[in-house]
Image (cartoon, coloured by chain):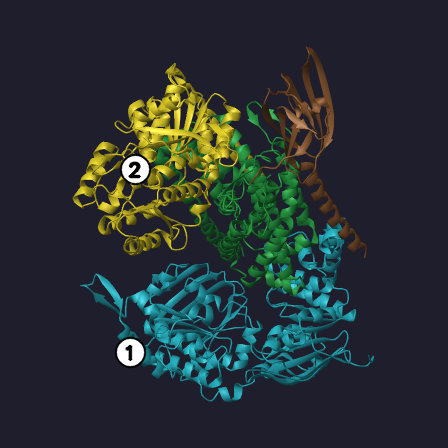
């Protein structure tokens, strides 16, 4: 082990998921006590990079990775996160990996509890040791102190405010004795400003103690404020690697978003609308991880309205709440008529349709054939594709009509399949997405919500999906609300775009504004005056 | 190592406990017979009036040519026979052990009173 | 103490809907049944001493997030096999009970280990899998007892073996050990017999469960019960821990079955174990437990309410409707109907809780 | 909070029960010298005849609820699973201070233990078990009187009757589970011995168990399909006997059509199998056995089955419930002795005008010990188109009592 070797070094790390390259030649290093800021859009490859570092099983299951990782000069390759933990690499996850029913103490010391001897251990092994609650309390208190927050160690996690959950999780990592490197994946996303401040302070303290930190954040302000070095990832490549004091927010934002130059070319024509169609007032939605706190929107008839924002800020909560899939409150009106919330049926009856981001669980009946999937909602909701039998006494499925409609959309959307009878799960992601769209088109809604329509599909399919949406909008005059994490995609199709940050609208801009303006909105830099019409 | 020893000891203890339960809990049937018998060549005549008690059970009367059944638990037992010998009340007390594997024993009370060898013998029901 | 406001009362009612529903039906039913207090109290005490142990055996897997363990029927089988041997060897009294328990341990461990393995392959579907497993194992049990015993496994007692020479008769008389534990320490208050020793054994299990929750293993089980993946990523061996949970439950169920049968006094060789699984689970649910939450108090309350219902409903039904067999139908309808309602109510409660979380969020909005 | 709830609920339940129970006891105390008799039977779906017997008693003596003497309750339909309920039903009867006798028909598993419990509490209650399911030695230890149908004597008498009807082959239909019942297995052995002694051919045929996977429908289908083949194989002069109630109906149906004899059912009654097999509606005759028999007999004759089909004129289950209830009443009033055969027959005869009864005490085949409180009984066999066969007068040779 050489003392001059960096703490962690990654050399030419490359990873593809079945030919789809997500990381290419990523090389960087981090010294002891250094804070590295890792930024990039959603899907830029940050998470995959961290998964590789921790040896998550999903990486091995999908064919491993290329390149090498050196810890203190020694090549390492972890088979499981536990091995990484043993080497002193800790991770604070974006989604909480805490046990809700356990107290802070119990979570911080999970599986590392202090225990007392009793005779039963001789008979049934060490797990028969009883917990030493007093000792656990002191250890937990010490760890919390290290984070530098005030936190009642006896509160169950389920009763904690989000910020405290985050601190608990960090305390858990710090409690480990040999921790050398800490990965913080968007730790401040759920924190209030003052809480974030505390966290940043404790990060500084940790770095002084020689603990290196990889800090993943969308809040560029924080990156600038705290990191020693900034690393910008885009499309799986390192775009920029600079000491933080030599760059600024604008530069980083531009490096992150990147494609601005060519995106400007095919901007949609500017259209104007003046007939409010869907009005949302003070909407809140309790969707785990996508909480909507207070949102008011006014969307015009025939408009394509984009909703953007970073993951976890609540943009997905909006359609899910309006469609009644998650507990919600506030007011939703269509053409002046109030739509009851928390009732999917009412939402559908109000001629709204929803293409969910959750294709596999909500969107599709995976074990059923394509034609069934396409016609299912229409059949259920509008009694279509049914023919009356015995003078209307019963209604039977009209297989002919179902097949016709399926063939129509297979052709229109270029769904690549063997036949309309093929099962949905046998299709590729892009084609599944097209089936979801067809399913929504069939019910001919007035308002169509499309959530993350291009997530996880390739570039070609993306274009078809977006073009289809656009065409459908132009042809039928359907109001389309498209929710996406990809700003460029929104800009290419929408008339106006709202950016959601921390469960609130941070601004609504015409799509023709430069991407930088949106980028800043996303990062919560601009005060949310915006153009709300 | 210490643990292995303790564990095997515990296992052994459990086994011993099982054996203890087995031996002390084993139930046996004792048939008490008051018939004229010939044991070792000597004839012992049935006794007219006779009361018998096994361990701390209740005293039971066994009539002439009668046979009664007592259920006992364990191996070591005591039998107390009270009878009238020419108008005089006499008590005979005998201790005996029985084998765990044998479910049923036959005790000849005249034999016992007469002090014969083999007043107790295993008894099997013909299947 | 906080002063109860309307909301907290409603919350109390909602979260205890099932026991309260039972209580209401029982308090309507008791007068119609016409039973005396003595009889009812005695019945409750008997049922508590008879069934609590079995119901308590369900708590450990619930702690480990494995739901209600239908696999306990396997433990019951092990207990019965222990009793069959003990009866065959004519081991009498407490020693018989003790020996039967010791004999049941290795069998229970084996069966528990097996079902744990299988349940690990069917995570999230433990209850159904356990049910089917018990059904399957019932076949194996019958094979062993009806064909194996007396032929391969020597059984000498002619009153137990069928006259054809192999197979155990459909009832085994447990007169040798009948109520020996119950009557070990006799206590009579008024006309009420209290089986002190049995309750002491039950108290011992309760202590064990309380203590067990405090051990590292218990803590690991609770962690797994809350989130298997989090526990796994913290380095807890989830599969092994789950198997241990099932083994503990199975061993306890075996003991519970022996206590149950020493009170009943006869063993229905081919049916006794079938009786206990469903009823123990129903009792626990009635007591206010759910698939992922079970406390000791739930077990006792459940046994009391559930069995009281079974005791009074036939008579209450008969006196209400005036025909004996309608009493039986009434009992079946009420008892099983209420169990179904209980399950529906739990689902409803879950929904309500979700809604409440939403409302809390909305209120938080208004405060801002 | 949970603990409080527990205590609260318990207290409320007890309070409620004490208040109400106090009331109900007062109500009962003014009926003077009277006493109550508890009758426990199955439900209509499980064993209708038993239940009708209880209703017959209620008709005569009134039910307790209306100030009468009979307290009738039922045991659960799935009694093999709900033994605890059976027990509490029986023990619950003893809670009535005026209860003087409990009759359980049929004495399903759990009866013995329930009787033990009643005895511990109330030694004054007469405990009578009709058609005991549990092992003879077990039920004898707890009941004052246990009754079974005389499977020993019937083992000889059924063969004897068949012989008198001119049968030369006797087919016994059953399956392994039933052959694991001591009583059924022993009767089969007697059948075989008697048949061999009388020069008849004895055949054992296996049919599917209705409680197994095939279900009742499957088992019945099997019988429907097999009977013609059996008749073909063994000839017209063959008598059939089956141990399972579900097998009886299809067997009768096919025998009427294809020929063959049926002396009597396992639990004989004019209602056993005949109504279904003949397709006759007996709802108007409910409980009136002479009328039922008349109608069944007429239909049998009409279909050409005269002299080939038999039964007991009065249902065994019906008379056992009613007869034992009556017997208990006679004993309590001091008019009868509990264990006197002739007194028992007197009580039975009340409900079976015209039919003779006979019986014996049960003797354990292993030890040869005669039980003094376990009586086996049987009724005269009635062959349709022929009349009573006089079986109670037939002497059963001693040797058959020891056949194992």
Q: Position of residue D126 (x, y in %)?
A: 44, 24
Residue D100 visible in rendering: yes
Q: Quadrant of residue C98?
A: top right
Give residue D269's mark: 2
Q: Which chain is green?
A: C
| Chain letter of the residue carrying label 1 | A
Percent x, y for residue A502?
55, 66
Question: Dividing the picture into quarters, in which one does residue A87 lie?
Answer: bottom right
Q: Residue at 56% of width from left, 42% of height from top?
A: C299
Q: Mark 1 vs mark 2: same chain?
A: no
Q: Position of residue C355 (x, y in %)?
A: 47, 54
What chain does mark 2 sit on?
Answer: D
Tell me, yes or no, whether the two marked residues, 1 and 2, touch with CB atoms within 8 Å.
no
Label 1 sits on residue: A404
A429 relative to C196 in the view: left or right: left
Q: Is residue C353 above or below residue A400?
A: above
In this view of the protein, which residue sits in the foreground, B6 or A300? Answer: B6
What tint does the image give chain A? cyan
Rendered shade, chain D: yellow
Locate the N terminus of chain B and report the quarter of the image it occupies.
bottom right
- C-alpha gap between disc 1 and disc 2: 66 Å
The picture's colour for chain B is brown
Given this view, does label 1 or label 2 mark the residue nearer the observer? 2
In the rendered image, which quarter is residue D33 located in? top left
Task: Spot the residue most to the front.
Answer: B41
Does D252 sit left or right of D339 as displayed?
left
How far from the left and from the top, in percent, is residue A8? 73, 78
């Amino acid at each position: 082990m050489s003392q001059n070797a960096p703490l962690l070094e990654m050399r030419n790390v490359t990873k593809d998921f079945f030919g789809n390259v997500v990381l290419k030649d990523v090389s960087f290093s981090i010294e002891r006590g250094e804070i590295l800021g890792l930024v990039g859009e959603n899907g830029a490859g940050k998470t995959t990079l961290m998964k590789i570092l921790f040896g998550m099983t999903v990486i091995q299951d999908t064919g491993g990775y290329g390149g090498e990782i050196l810890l203190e000069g020694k090549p390492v390759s972890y088979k499981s996160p536990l091995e990484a933990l043993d080497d002193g690499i800790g991770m604070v996850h974006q989604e909480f990996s805490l046990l809700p029913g356990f107290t802070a103490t119990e979570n911080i010391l999970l599986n590392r509890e202090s225990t007392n001897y009793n005779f039963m251990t001789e008979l049934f092994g060490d797990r028969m040791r009883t917990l030493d609650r007093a000792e656990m309390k002191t250890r937990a208190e010490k760890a919390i102190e290290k984070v530098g927050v005030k936190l009642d160690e006896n509160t169950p996690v389920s009763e904690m405010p989000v910020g405290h959950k985050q601190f608990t999780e960090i305390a858990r990592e710090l409690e480990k004795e040999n921790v050398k490197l800490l990965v913080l994946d968007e730790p401040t996303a759920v924190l209030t400003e003052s809480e974030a401040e505390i966290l940043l302070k404790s990060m500084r303290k940790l770095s002084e103690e020689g603990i290196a930190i990889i800090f993943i954040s969308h809040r560029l302000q924080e990156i600038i404020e705290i990191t020693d070095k900034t690393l910008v990832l885009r499309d799986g490549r390192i775009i920029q690697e600079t000491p933080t004091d030599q760059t600024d927010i604008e530069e980083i934002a531009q490096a992150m978003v990147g494609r601005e130059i060519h995106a400007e070319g095919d901007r949609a024509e500017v259209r104007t609308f003046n007939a409010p169609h869907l009005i949302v007032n003070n909407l809140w939605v309790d969707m785990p991880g996508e909480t909507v706190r207070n949102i008011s929107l006014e969307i015009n008839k025939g408009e394509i309205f984009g909703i953007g924002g970073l993951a976890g800020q609540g943009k997905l909560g909006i359609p899910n709440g309006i469609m009644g899939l998650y507990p919600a409150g506030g007011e939703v009106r269509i053409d002046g008529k109030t739509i009851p919330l928390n009732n999917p049926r009412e939402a559908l009856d109000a001629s709204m349709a929803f293409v969910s981001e959750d294709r596999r669980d909500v969107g599709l009946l995976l074990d059923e054939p394509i034609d069934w999937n396409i016609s299912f909602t229409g059949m259920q909701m509008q009694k279509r594709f049914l023919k009356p039998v015995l003078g209307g006494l019963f209604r039977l499925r009209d297989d002919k009509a179902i097949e016709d409609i399926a063939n129509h959309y297979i052709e229109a959307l270029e769904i690549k399949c063997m036949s309309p009878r093929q099962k949905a799960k046998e299709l590729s992601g892009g084609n599944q997405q097209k089936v979801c769209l067809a399913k929504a088109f069939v019910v001919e809604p007035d308002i169509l919500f499309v959530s993350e329509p291009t997530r996880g599909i390739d570039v070609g399919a993306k274009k078809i999906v977006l073009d289809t949406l656009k065409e459908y909008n132009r042809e039928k005059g359907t109001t389309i609300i498209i929710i996406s994490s990809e700003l460029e995609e929104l800009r290419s199709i929408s008339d106006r775009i709202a950016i959601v940050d921390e469960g609130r609208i941070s601004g609504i801009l015409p799509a023709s504004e430069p991407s930088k303006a949106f980028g800043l909105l996303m990062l919560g830099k601009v005060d949310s005056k915006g153009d709300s019409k | 190592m210490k643990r292995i020893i303790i564990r095997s000891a515990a296992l052994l203890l459990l086994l011993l406990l099982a054996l203890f339960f087995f031996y002390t809990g084993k139930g046996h049937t004792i048939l008490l017979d008051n018939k004229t018998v010939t044991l070792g060549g000597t004839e012992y005549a049935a006794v007219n009036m006779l009361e018998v008690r096994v361990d701390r059970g209740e005293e039971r009367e066994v009539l002439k040519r009668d046979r009664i059944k007592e259920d006992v638990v364990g191996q070591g037992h005591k039998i107390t026979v009270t009878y009238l010998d020419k108008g005089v009340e006499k008590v005979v007390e005998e201790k005996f052990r029985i084998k765990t594997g044998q479910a049923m024993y036959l005790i000849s009370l005249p034999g016992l009173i007469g002090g014969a060898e083999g007043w107790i013998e295993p008894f099997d029901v013909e299947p | 103490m906080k002063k109860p406001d309307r909301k907290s009362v409603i919350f109390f009612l909602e979260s205890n809907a099932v026991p309260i529903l039972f209580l209401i039906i029982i308090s309507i039913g008791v007068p119609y049944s016409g039973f005396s207090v003595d009889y009812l109290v005695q019945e409750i005490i008997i049922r508590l001493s008879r069934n609590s142990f079995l119901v308590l055996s369900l708590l450990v897997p619930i702690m480990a997030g494995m739901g209600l363990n239908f696999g306990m029927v396997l433990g019951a089988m092990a207990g019965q096999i222990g009793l069959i041997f003990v009866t065959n060897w004519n081991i009498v009294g407490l020693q018989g009970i003790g020996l039967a328990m010791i004999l049941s341990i290795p069998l229970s461990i084996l069966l528990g280990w097996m079902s744990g393995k299988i349940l690990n392959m069917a995570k999230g579907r433990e209850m159904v899998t356990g049910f089917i497993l018990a059904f399957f194992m019932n076949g194996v049990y019958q094979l062993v007892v009806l064909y194996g015993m007396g032929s391969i496994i020597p059984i000498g007692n002619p009153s137990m073996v069928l006259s054809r020479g192999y197979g155990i008769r459909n009832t085994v008389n447990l007169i040798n050990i009948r109520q020996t534990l119950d009557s070990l320490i006799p206590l009579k208050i008024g006309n009420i017999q209290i089986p002190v020793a049995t309750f002491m054994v039950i108290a011992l299990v309760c202590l064990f469960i309380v203590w067990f929750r405090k051990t590292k293993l218990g803590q690991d089980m609770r962690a797994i019960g809350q989130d298997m993946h989090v526990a796994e990523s913290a380095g807890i061996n989830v599969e092994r821990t789950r198997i241990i949970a099932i083994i503990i439950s199975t061993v306890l169920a075996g003991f519970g079955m022996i206590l149950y049968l020493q009170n009943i006094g006869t063993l229905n060789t081919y049916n006794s174990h079938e009786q206990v699984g469903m009823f123990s689970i129903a009792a626990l649910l009635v007591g206010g437990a759910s698939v992922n939450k079970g406390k000791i108090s739930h077990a006792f309350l459940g046994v009391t309410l559930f069995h009281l219902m079974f005791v009074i409903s036939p008579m209450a039904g008969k006196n209400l409707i005036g025909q004996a067999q309608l009493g039986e139908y009434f009992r079946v309808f009420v008892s099983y109907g209420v169990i179904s309602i209980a399950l529906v109510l739990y689902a409803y409660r879950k929904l309500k809780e979700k809604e409440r979380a939403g409302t809390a969020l909305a209120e938080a909005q208004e405060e801002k | 909070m949970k603990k409080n709830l527990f205590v609260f609920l318990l207290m409320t339940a007890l309070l409620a029960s004490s208040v109400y129970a106090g009331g109900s006891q007062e109500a009962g105390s003014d009926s003077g010298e009277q006493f109550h008799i508890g009758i426990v039977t199955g439900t209509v779906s499980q064993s209708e005849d038993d239940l009708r017997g209880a209703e017959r008693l209620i008709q005569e003596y009134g039910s307790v609820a209306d100030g009468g003497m009979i307290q009738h309750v039922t045991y659960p339909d799935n009694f093999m699973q709900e033994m605890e309920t059976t027990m509490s039903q029986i023990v619950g009867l003893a809670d009535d201070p005026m209860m003087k006798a409990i009759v359980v028909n049929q004495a399903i598993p759990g009866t013995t233990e329930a009787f033990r419990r009643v005895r511990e509490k109330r030694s004054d209650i007469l405990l009578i078990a009709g058609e005991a399911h549990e092992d003879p030695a077990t039920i004898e230890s707890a009941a004052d009187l246990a009754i079974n149908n005389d499977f020993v004597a019937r083992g000889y008498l059924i063969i004897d009757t068949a012989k008198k009807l001119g049968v030369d082959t006797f087919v016994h239909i059953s399956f392994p589970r039933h052959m694991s019942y001591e009583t059924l297995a022993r009767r089969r052995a007697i059948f075989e011995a008697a048949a061999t002694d009388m020069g008849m051919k004895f055949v054992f045929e296996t049919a599917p168990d209705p409680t197994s996977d095939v279900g009742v429908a499957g088992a019945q289908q099997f019988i429907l399909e097999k009977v013609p083949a059996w008749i073909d194989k063994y000839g017209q002069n063959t008598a059939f006997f089956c141990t399972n109630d579900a097998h009886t109906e299809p067997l009768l149906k096919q025998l009427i059509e294809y020929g063959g004899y049926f002396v009597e059912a396992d639990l004989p009654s004019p209602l056993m199998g005949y109504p279904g097999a003949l397709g006759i509606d007996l709802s108007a005759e409910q409980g009136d056995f002479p009328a039922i028999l008349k109608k069944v007999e007429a239909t049998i004759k009409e279909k050409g089955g005269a002299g080939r089909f038999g039964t007991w004129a009065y249902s065994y289950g019906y008379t056992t419930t009613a007869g034992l209830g009556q017997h208990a009443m006679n004993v309590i009033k001091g008019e009868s002795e509990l264990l006197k055969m002739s007194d028992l027959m007197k009580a039975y005869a009340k409900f079976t005008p015209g039919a003779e009864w006979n019986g014996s005490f049960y003797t354990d085949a292993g030890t040869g010990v005669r039980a003094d409180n376990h009586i086996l009984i049987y009724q005269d066999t009635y062959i349709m188109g022929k009349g009573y066969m006089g079986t109670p007068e037939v002497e059963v040779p001693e040797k058959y009592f020891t056949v194992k």
